[in-house]
Image: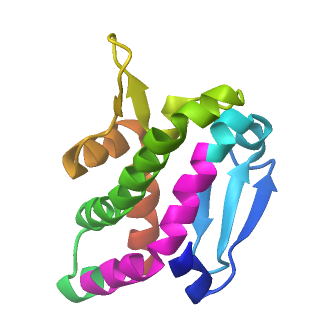
Amino acid sequence: METVQKEGKVGIRVDPEVSTAYFHRQQRVVVLGEMMARDPTIAMGVLAFELSNASLDRAFEECERNADIAQLSPREFAESFEKVEYNSTRNVQAYYMEAHETLRRVGLDNPNAWQCMVTAQGHIEPSTRSEDDAVANSLATGHFGRYEQEYAKRNM
């Protein structure tokens, strides 16, 4: 949170036109899809993730600069961006593991929203364990496409 505060305020906006969530770097606002925002068990984890992305704004900027210098392909750029975003995955996993008992007690427990899972033995573990897992998940879900398209447009 300290990093976010140093770089300027971050707003939060609920948007009925958006189905997911994202941090809009130029506007410094976290945008939550209305359906996500309606369920606090989802919204909390997603909001924590996007606020973590806000704290990584400088790393994302550096990623963009390096991509321009190296003239990366859209796929390579998306991969490097996803590797920065993996830090947010690790952050929210740590937050959840620390707070899950409290979240459970107040009825807000949802490991998936914090990128965690409950094993068959009842243990809480990260559902994404590495940068490579994060990249593979992003490819499988289509998350990569957004980064590839933005980069391709910027470099036309």
Residue 121 occupies which quadrant of the picture? top left
154, 136: nearer the viewer = 136
Residue 11 point in image, percent of width and height: 74, 71
In the image, what residue occupies the spot 77% across and 49% down?
A: 17
Q: Is 62 inside the magenta-drawn segment?
A: yes
Is residue 20 found left or right of 36 in the rendered image?
Answer: left
Residue 156 seen from this side: no
Reply above or below: 50 against 142. Answer: below
Residue 128 seen from this side: yes
Reply above or below: 15 against 5. Answer: above
Reply above or below: 25 against 119. Answer: below
Is residue 107 found left or right of 66 in the rendered image?
Answer: right
Is residue 110 found left or right of 53 in the rendered image?
Answer: right
The magenta-colored residue range is 45-66
Residue 79 point in image, percent of width and height: 27, 59
Residue 42 occupies which quadrant of the picture? top right
